[in-house]
Image (cartoon, helix red, strand yellow):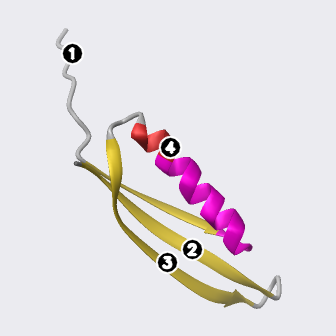
């Protein structure tokens, strides 16, 4: 049996929330989790759209983490 330990070099996470501050908290939480994997934020893209079913704005973000 062979065990291989590879370093994760890139990771992309998608997050969404109906409140901008909630999305910001979720991004901060994911940043702290990925620090343990030695990954840092490389790029953040965000978008807002209207959800007609809930009659609210839906905020989303894509966070790209990478090894420094």
Badge 3: residue crowd in 10 Å (few <14, some 14–19, many ≥20): few
The answer to which quarter of the image holds residue 64 is bottom left
Report the residue at 73% width, 74% height from top: 18
Q: Is residue 38 above or below residue 11?
A: above
What residue did someone put label 1 on?
Answer: 3
Question: Does residue 9 appear left or right of residue 34 in this picture?
Answer: left
What residue did someone put label 4 on?
Answer: 32
Bounds of the magenta span? 17-31
The disc at residue 46 is 3
Q: Nearer the viewer, mark 1 or mark 4?
A: 4
Q: Nearer the viewer, mark 1 or mark 3?
A: 3
Report the residue at 61% width, 68% height from top: 16
Local secondary structure at mark 4: helix
Q: Is residue 37 above or below residue 64?
A: above
The answer to which quarter of the image holds residue 34 is top left
Q: Nearer the viewer, mark 2 or mark 1?
A: 2
In this view, the residue farthest toward the right is 54
Local secondary structure at mark 2: strand
The location of residue 26, given as percent across then percent down, is: 61, 56
What residue did someone put label 2 on?
Answer: 60
In space, the residues marked 4 and 3 are separated at their CA atoms by: 19 Å
Q: Give the main secondary structure of the magenta stretch.
A: helix
């Amino acid at each position: 049996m062979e065990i291989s330990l590879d370093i994760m070099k890139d990771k992309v996470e998608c997050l969404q929330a109906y409140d901008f501050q909630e999305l910001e908290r979720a991004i901060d939480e994911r940043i702290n989790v990925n620090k343990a994997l030695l990954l840092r934020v490389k790029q953040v893209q965000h978008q807002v759209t209207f959800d007609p079913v809930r009659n609210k704005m839906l905020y989303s973000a894509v966070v790209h983490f990478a090894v420094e």
